[in-house]
Amino acid sequence: MDIAQVFVWLHDTTFATAIRESGVLFPWIESVHVLAVTFVVGSISIVDLRLLGVASANRSIVSVSADVLPFTWTAFVFAVLTGSALFTSHAVGYAQNFQFRAKLLLLVLAGVNMLAFHLIMGRGLGRWSESGAAPWQGKVAGLISLLLWIGIVALGRWIGFESVR
């Protein structure tokens, strides 16, 4: 079975059909998805702005992250679950949609940026985060993260204006 057949299978599941044919399921799931993405981007932005020294400069990055990241991960789980449900309802159309594929690419890049930040900077967070100013690597990671998430949100909104049926 190739990937195109998987998308057709997803599209034809009872779950996807129920979402697609219901007058209320798709809008409700989409609303939860948008709220979850808003929490994800908002909470990540708090950490990124701290890295850039624009907000919460009087608090350590470790403290800001510890306060915010549990909300980020919870919201991310809801965003993935609702986004997956929305995807199944029009899997073939979404899979062929440029904006959708670009959004997924930016999501992967945001994950790589986060992983690189934690692998490169993670061990030294305790030493530099108390001083107020992040080293240039932390600022670059924060700026890249902000730009990626702005792109993810813009592409997500753009998907809503494209026909995927």
Image (cartoon, rainbow, N blue to C red):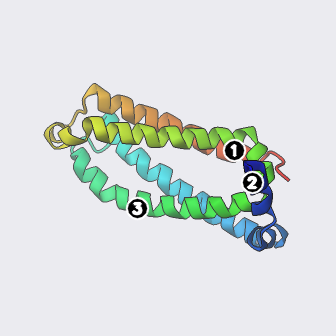
| Residue wearing tag 2 | 1
Who comes first in sequence, dot 2 or dot 3? 2
How would you rate the neighbour count of disc 2 (Cα within 10 Å): few for under 14, some for 14-19, many for 20 or more? few
Q: CA distance from mark 3 to mark 1?
A: 25 Å
Amino acid type of the residue tagged 2 in the rendering: Met
Amino acid type of the residue tagged 1 in the rendering: Phe
Who comes first in sequence, dot 3 or dot 1? 3
| Depth order, front residue of 121/161 | 121
| Residue wearing tag 1 | 100
Residue 107 can be seen, yes or no:
yes
Q: CA distance from mark 2 to mark 1?
A: 23 Å
| Coordinates of residue 152 in the picture (x, y in percent) | 59, 42
Determine whether the residue tagged by mark 1 lies in a helix, strand or loop.
helix
Residue 54 can be seen, yes or no:
no
* Quadrant assignment for the N terminus: bottom right
| Coordinates of residue 31 in the picture (x, y in percent) | 65, 64
Residues under numbered marks 3 and 1 in contact, where contact means CB atoms less than 8 Å apart: no
Determine whether the residue tagged by mark 3 lies in a helix, strand or loop.
helix
Residue 118's tag is none
Residues under numbered marks 2 and 3 in contact, where contact means CB atoms less than 8 Å apart: no
Give the left or right position of residue 114, taking residue 2 as reference.
left
**Height in image: 162 above or below 8?**
above
